[in-house]
Amino acid sequence: AGLTMLSYHCHSLHPAGVSCVGVLLESHISFHTWPDEGVITLDMFTTSSKPLLPALPEIERLFGVPRVNAETGEEEEPVSVWSHELRGFRTDEERRANVYDDNSDLSNWITSPLEVTKKQIVTVKTEIQQIDIWDASEREDLPSYEDGVRLGFGPDDPRWMQHEYASPTRLLFLDGALLAIADSDAEFHESLVHPGMFAHPSPKNVAILGGGDGATLREVLRHRSVEKVTMIEKDAKLVELARVHLPKMCNCSEIVGSTEVCFDDARVELVYQQPKDYFALNNLTDIDFLVLDGTVPETDREVPEHWFNDKKFVDAMIDSLSENGVLATQVGTAPTILDPRADLSVFRHRERFINSLEANPKIKSIFIYEEAHCGFYEPKAFLVACRDVTCRRHWYAETDEIDYAIYDRIGGLKDGKPSLVHYDGATQRSFQAPPRAWETVYCRREPEPFECAYRGLDKNAELFEFDPENEEESSFEIRMSKNKETGEDEVGVYAKVDMPEGSYLMPTHLAASFEVSDDSMENVHANTQIEGVDKATVIEDFIDFIDTHGHPSIQEGSGKNYVEVGGSFMMRISEDPEEANVRRWIPSHPDGGRPKFSPVYDRHRHSFDVFLVASRDIKAGEEVVKPVGLWDI
């Protein structure tokens, strides 16, 4: 450690052991021994600018005396438990610049906690950043399933509950920020890559910004549609270290058609350059899928160099996308309902990035989602942005559709096992509606977004139900009348009681509306046109019913349609706006359509597509009438 001893004093303890204190030119050192327990504790404090961590191997060599097992006679490897803390007085800037400061991930996960057993694999300071790779485990960790298989544990093996058989996990830090956890990298990188990849019908040309550990590249290469991947990594040393120390993360040996190491796949072009410089020098316009894989700033200070804060670079990335191109990135820690307005919090950089995407006219839809199984202390958040609004059709796909798409485009590994361990149709289903905290924080924007007034049904509004089996309780009745123009009989729905403006009309019946996709309708229509097949009147009647009483979702591009099956489908439709007295629950957005980014629309899209309210006071005995174009976007 380069420290200078000035003096020391030792004395014996009763009944055994010794304590020593040494005065250093730079501060002091002390230790105490417990021979019966085979323990020595050591405290070293220095005011020197030289780091103490490089001295750890020598300290362990000198003080970690092997103990002989009384039963086996074998030497037991000493176990070191240590904590490294920065003390003293530092400016905020000095603290941010030190990767061992207690605000850094490296400190919180590795160097500070005593309960963590850790081993330094490699630390390299390049011209660009400091790269740290560590193995770590906690005292409470128990063997994983893979540990049990590797060690041959049986069902009743007591070793399942013994910490010493648990494998440590490997962690990658860049400038003190935790980038990847080897044990849960599949959960993280599958969540980062596949939702966006499957939002595109057939991604062929892919670009990765960052991703030097190789795990994002690994997930991209699973897609058989991919013909070219350009990986722009600013630090060649990170890729070099990943090959040696993170082999699991860049392992493509089991992917059909790939290579042992993902970086060596013939489809991959490695570019060692700052991503901003690369985009400035290359006029890219044909990227189907662009994924950003790097650390995310979560701080109250400005970080102008990060791509989240560079609108010009964000626009350049969007310009690089093909007409139906998709952009995906992780966006840091998921919010909580206690968070302040995003632009006033440590998430201001994420909010600025989202604002840049919203402001770009080429972006048509933005999705936010989070995953709690990535191994980090808190759930990680991700974002997907699309240039074509029809990506909503893929995003809102049913579970079985996603499962089939995975089978069709990715398939299995060489040994026949599934390629993905975390992402599937059910996982995608959980991503389709962001957690409530996103909606809460979004609605703290100023001015408050229009749709935030419709986050839940109005508790003060009345509900009027239609009950054909209980006429006395029903608020509506069905009457037959003559059409004034055609003279034909027609059905009408009439109010039996006064219904104030804003009241919910037949909510139970409307909630029972069924959803049918454009794809399903196309298939049904096509089946009725097959020559040589007898016409099925019931199917044709079903199609006519959907065409008459169904309407497309107000979520443009989603490919969803909703069909009313209750009493509401009998309401007459009028072209006279003065006659109509019904409107959909959420009115048309003042800006037209729906916002390209809105957790509110994503969370309540089904309710927004079915519920109706009285557009004015409806008197008892008055006919309930829908306007033409009720569900027009």
Image (cartoon, helix red, strand yellow):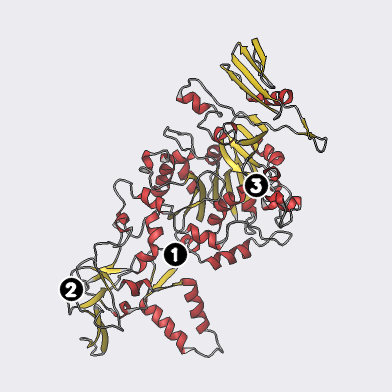
Marked residue nearer the N-terminal end (1 or 3): 3
Residue found at the very far front of the displayed protein: 15
The quarter of the image holding the N terminus is top right
Is the Cβ of the residue at disc 1 closer than 8 Å to that at disc 2?
no
Residue at 48% in and 34% down:
305
Which residue position is annotated with label 2?
498
Circle 2 packing at 10 Å, graded few (<14), some (14-19), many (20+), is some
Q: Quadrant of residue 633?
A: bottom left
Which dot marks residue 558?
1
Q: Is residue 142 visible?
A: yes
Q: Quadrant of residue 211?
A: top right
Label 1 – label 3 distance at C-alpha: 45 Å
Which residue position is annotated with label 3?
142
Q: Say above or below: 281 vs 82.
A: below
Q: Compare residues 466 and 243 and report the one nearer the observer.
A: 466
Q: Say above or below: 277 vs 420.
A: above
Is 471 left, or right, of 153 in this rendering?
A: left
Residue at 37% in and 48% down:
441
Residue at 34% in and 75% down:
509
Where does residue 132 sit, x and y in percent of width and height? Answer: 63, 34
**Residue type marked 1:** Ser
Q: Compare residues 349 and 235 and report the one nearer the observer.
A: 349
Is 181 left, or right, of 610 in this rendering?
A: right
Q: Mark 1 vs mark 2: give the one in front.
A: 2
Where does residue 413 sit, x and y in percent of width and height? Answer: 70, 59
**Residue type marked 3:** Leu
